[in-house]
Amino acid sequence: MSGLLALLDDVAGIAKVAAASVDDVIGQAAKAGAKAAGAVIDDAAVTPKYVQGFAAERELPIIWRITKGSLKNKLVFLLPVGLLLANFAPWAIPPLLMLGGAYLCFEGAEKVAHVLGWGHGHEDYAGKETEEQDPAHLEEQKAAGAIKTDFILSAEIMTISLAAIPESNFWFEAATLAAVAVMITVAVYGSVALIVKADDVGLALASGGRLAPTRALGRGIVKVMPGFMKMLTIVGTAAMLWVGGSIIIHGLAEMGWHAPEDIIYGIGKAVGAGSGLIEWAVKAGIDGVLGLAVGFLLIPVGEKVITPIWRAVVPKAA
C-alpha cells in the first residue's frame, strides 16, 4: 500500500512539473508573441482584402484555407529553420531580424507613399492581368497570394518571437515557438473572420432583429465597419514602421553599433521625465520616423530592382 501511495505521489509530482512547464511555455509564448505586435496587426489588417469581391458564402472557406496555409508556414517550414538558427547559427538572427524589419519599413512606407500619391506600389505594374477570371481560379490565386504574404509576415513573427524567448533547452524553445505559432494564427485569422463577417451580421440584425435596439445595433455595426477598417489599416501601418524601425536600431546595437539606440533611449528618458508611457511613446515615435525614412529609401530598390527580378523568376507572382 505504501508503495502505491509513493507511486501516486511521484505521478502527482510529475504532473505538477508538467503543468508548470506548460504554464511556462504559454507564458513565454504570450510574451514572445507580444514582441511581434507590428507584424501581427499588419497581418490582421492585410488579410481581409483577399476575400473582397467573393460571394459571402465563400469568405469563411477562403479564410480557413489561408489559416491552414499559415499554420503550415509557421510549423512545417519556419519553426525548424528558426530552431536550427538559434542553436547552430545565432549570429545570423540579428541580420535576419534587420532584413525583416527593413521589409516592414518598406511595406509601411509604401502605404504612406500611396496615400500621398507617390509611386504606384509593387502590386500595380504594367502588364498586370486585368481581365475577368473564373471565380474558382481567382479564389485559388487569391488564397495562394495570401499564403505567400503570410509566409513573409510569419517569418518576421517567428524570428522576433524566437529572439524574445529566454535561452533554454531545445525542446522548451520548440514548444514555446509552436505555441506562439498556434496562438498568433488563431488570434489573427479568428479576428479576420470576425471582421469580414461583421457587415453580414450587422445587416442580418438590422433587417431581421425583433427588437428596435437589436436593429439599431445592426445599423451601427454596418456604419462603423468602414471606419474601423480604415483605422485598422492606419494602426497596422504605424505598427509596421515602429516595429521595423526598432528592429533595425536594436539589430545595429546587437552587431556592435550602440549609438543610435543609446541616443533614442536618452531622448525618451529626458522627455518622459519619469513617465513610462511617455518615454515609450517618444521612443516608439522616433523608431517609427526612422522606419519611415528607411522605407522611403527602400521603395525605389523594391519597385525598380527586387520586384521586377522576382516577377521574372516567378511569372505568376502577384
Image: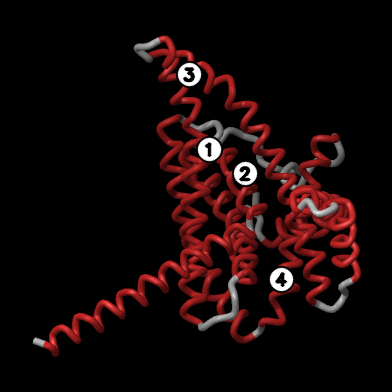
Question: Dot 1 lies on which element?
Answer: helix
Whether residue 303 is visible here, answered yes or no, is no
Q: Residue 301, relative to residue 126: is it above or below?
A: below
Please identify, in this view, whether the residue under mark 2 or under mark 3 is nearer the observer.
Answer: 3
Disc 2 and disc 3: Cα gap in Å? 26 Å
Please identify, in this view, whether the residue under mark 1 or under mark 2 is nearer the observer.
Answer: 2
Q: Please name whichever residue, 7 or 82, is drawn nearer the observer in this view of the structure.
A: 7
Give the residue pinned by disc 4: 96
Q: Please name whichever residue, 250 or 142, is drawn nearer the observer in this view of the structure.
A: 250
Q: Is residue 220 left or right of residue 259?
A: left
Q: Quadrant of residue 255?
A: bottom right
Please name the amino acid that badge 1 sits on.
Answer: Val
Is mark 4 in CB contact (under 8 Å) with mark 3?
no
Q: Position of residue 99 (x, y in %)?
A: 75, 66
Q: Residue furthest top?
A: 212
Disc 3 and disc 1: Cα gap in Å? 25 Å
Disc 2 and disc 4: Cα gap in Å? 23 Å
Whichever of labels 3 and 1 marks the residue nearer the N terminus, that label is: 1
Give the residue pinned by disc 3: 217
Please name the amino acid that badge 4 sits on.
Answer: Leu
Disc 1 and disc 2: Cα gap in Å? 11 Å
Question: Dot 3 lies on which element?
Answer: helix
Please name the amino acid that badge 2 sits on.
Answer: Val
Where does the N terminus fall, quadrant-wise? bottom left
Disc 4 and disc 3: Cα gap in Å? 46 Å
Please identify, in this view, whether the residue under mark 1 or under mark 4 is nearer the observer.
Answer: 4
Is mark 1 in CB contact (under 8 Å) with mark 4?
no
Q: Position of residue 225 (x, y in %)?
A: 58, 27
Give the residue pinned by disc 1: 51
Please identify, in this view, whether the residue under mark 3 or under mark 1 is nearer the observer.
Answer: 3
Q: Please name whichever residue, 231 or 34, is drawn nearer the observer in this view of the structure.
A: 34
